[in-house]
Amino acid sequence: MLLSLDVLDEPRFRRSNPDFCYGNPCVYVGMTGLSPDVRFDKHKAGIQANGFVRRYGVRLLPELYEVYNPMPYAAACEMEVELAIALREKGYGVWQA
């Protein structure tokens, strides 16, 4: 999920992304058994929501996740971590569930 760059005003987010490169997006990486659209709507509505997504979520980024869906639970747990690491290595700002 794309996060507004306003999330960079959050100290916890900044501490988690010391190598963030301006010009790259900030994103939330998580996994769900729901469709991404439904899960995003729940975050924005405050239902089992991540606070950063609720406050700063802009839209989904299907280009980052469509190739991975659907996926068994155990593989999704691993992929969530791997994707977050890969995006941080590219200079993205990443918040992970």
Image (spheres, rainbow, N blue to C red):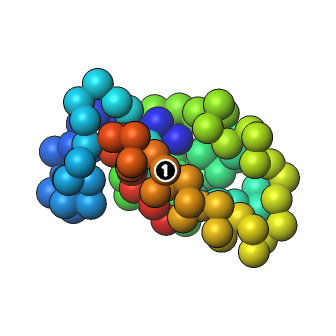
Where residue 27 appears, as percent x and y from the top left, is 44, 43
Position of 59 with respect to 16 (left or right) is right
Q: Is residue 2 above or below residue 35?
A: above
Considering depth in this image, is 15 or 41 the residue closer to the camera?
15
Crowding at mark 1 (Cα within 10 Å: few <14, some 14-19, many 20+): few
- Location of residue 74 in the rendering, given as x and y in whole percent from the top left corner: 75, 75
Whether residue 46 is visible: no
Residue at label 1?
86
Please state if 21 lies on the left or on the right of 57 as rendered.
left
Q: Residue at x 66, y 33 (%)?
A: 62
Q: Residue at x 48, y 55 (%)?
A: 84
Residue closest to the eye, 87 or 70:
87
What residue type is disc 1 on? Ala
Secondary structure beneath label 1: helix
Say which quarter of the image contains residue 82.
bottom right
Question: Given the current orientation, which residue lies at the most extreme top position?
Answer: 23
Q: Determine if residue 86 is in view.
A: yes
x and y, in percent, of residue 81 in the image:
54, 64
Q: Quadrant of residue 37?
A: top right
Q: Is residue 78 above or below residue 2?
A: below
Residue drawn at 15 percent across, 57 percent down = 11
Q: 11 above or below 72?
A: above
Q: Residue 12's image quarter? A: bottom left
Q: Residue at x 65, y 51 (%)?
A: 39
Q: Is residue 88 left or right of residue 18?
A: right
